[in-house]
Image: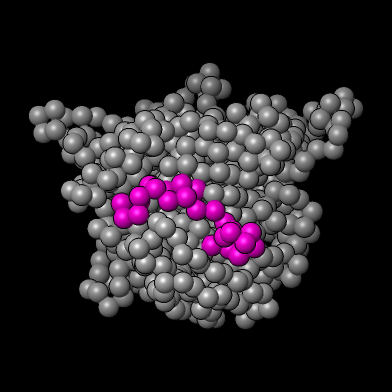
Amino acid sequence: HKSLRLYPRFADVHAAAAFSTASTSTAHHHHHFVVEDNKHFTTALATLAAAAAATASLYYTATTLPSTKNEAATVPAVSTTEEHETRTIINWSGTHTIEVPESSYFEPESLEELEDIVKRAHANNTPIRPVGSALSPNGVSFHKGGMVSMAHMDQIVSVDEEQQTVTVQAGARVSDVIEELRKHNLTLPNLASIAEQQMGGFVQVGAHGTGALIPPVDDFVKSLKLVTPGCGTVELTRYLKDGVTEDPLFLLARVGLGSLGILAEVTMQCIPAHQLMEHTYVLTRDMARKKLPELLRQHKHMRYMWIPYEDAVVVVTNDPTVEGEESDPALAEVYEALGRSKEEQFEPLINLLLELAPDEKKYSKEELQGMGFGEIRDALLAINPLDVEHVKKCNKAEAEFWRRSEGHQIKPSDKLLQFDCGGEQWVWEVCFPTGTYHDKNTNDIDFMEELLAGIESRGIAAHSPIEQRWTASSSSFMSPAHGCPGGLHSWVGIIMYLPADNAKQREEITAEFKGRYCDLMRGIGNKVSAASHWAKLELPDTEDDARELKEHIYARYPVDLFNRARKQFDPKGILSNDLMNVAFSQQHEE
């Protein structure tokens, strides 16, 4: 009762030539949908009937995040072997590699080229999984049979200052869109941690930032243009002709996972550009629990970073500045006085590294001065990443680093909403409901306290931090944060960092992370209907895992509707890959 009422489950889908109004009811809130005849469809899709959400078993997979140290890596690494006429594609983090026939790897530069590629691939039954910057940790965009890179379809089509919208091709990078919007005194409402994503993947996997009143980024999509094998080029907007009724196809396609069509163009809602004041400080765990409701209400953006084995929770809040605040010299002096020098901040980490680094990997102080926080932490953990006592020392030094880094800074919003994710790492992130903005329950803090207690009682070498963020509900059917307006959702990500040059350590870390660590969080997540982030969902290794995944997907999402749309838009399945086919296959299929 505490959490399930936020999730409608769409229990039935009926095809019909014309559609009558249907309602999806959750608690006391109702959505009304009508789908009208559309010239793009030979048959119609979907009247949505309501049903209460059932408790979903949590399916977990672990994957790796890219290293933010490689800032120049803005496209998937590609190499060509002429002898075998194949192309090797490596994702941004270097953790997923596939070989694609050179004849089946496409890089269109215009909508017309893309339409021609899709038409020919459909006729020849050639797979063409869409790929952007290949930033998704799980390689969700990969297919060894064929791919379409959107890297060259990166134009910013138009900016409407009056309506505060931007229309871009799907290959445009988030960072480039932000820079163009800056010229018009606009920006995007929220960002994920890394801005090297392309806009297509940014919305199709349901990326998110943090803010109790701010939904994931897909909820800011105003319209989209899909190039589909079965229906040609389809343009969808949120509302039908009456301007009131929401189009369920649009709400489905926003987080379409690249399986309904290749997203060619998207229009996003923007907001006025603004400065944010960031405040970073450390609380005890007890104070983090007590102050959480107040912090979520008081701050536009707020996140917690929990440090295992330490009574320390790093709080980062961001709020728009008031006029003149950013240029007030008196305030600038106060903020400067609160901060410490870089040498003082880094001292606990550097001293520990100088003490513990083996002789063959000794660092000079000059070398350490040129390293960033993430690099020093990676070097520290790599000494003995699965030894609990060693990890405790690293986490203790990190907690002290954050205490010495307490203070304020003021910058444009896009400069503060991105942050360093560290080096290569296993990561698993889940999303779960935690009441509503006005009536929050304690799912979020209970989840974290049980997770930390489990880590510490089991002696898991949990690296820091465990990040916790919050968003409002998304109206996109396939979003892990789908729910009623006013809903509140928490996102929790666990990590273990991977040494770059020690294969044995990487194997051992992988086994520990996928085993005991993820098993622990999965069990806790079951209690609150947690769902995996789509970009962190790996292909199951066993039939039992595949069955568990399908059970979770069917309980959590409107799979019948999604599959009807897949069948209509992509009747031969050339846009999907093994992960999509396993996740959305019929439950009775083996």
Residue drawn at the location 66% of the way across and 53% of the way down: 214
Q: Quadrant of the C terminus?
A: bottom left
Residue 124 locus on image (x, y percent): 18, 48
Left or right of 273? Residue 190 is: left
Question: Which residue shows up at 53% across the image and 79% down it?
Answer: 50
Q: Nearer the viewer, residue 352 or 342?
A: 342
Q: Position of residue 245 (x, y in %)?
A: 60, 65
- Where residue 203 appears, x then y in whole percent? 50, 48
Query: In the image, is residue 59 above or below residue 123?
Result: below
Residue at (36, 27) in percent of width and height: 360
Residue 538: tell me if it is visible: no
Q: Nearer the viewer, residue 585 or 191?
A: 585
**Is 243 one of the magenta-colored residues?**
yes
Residues rendered magenta in the picture: 224-247
Q: Is residue 294 left or right of residue 524?
A: right
Residue 584's image quarter? bottom left
The answer to whether one can see residue 303 in this image is yes
Name the residue at 72% across, 64% down: 437
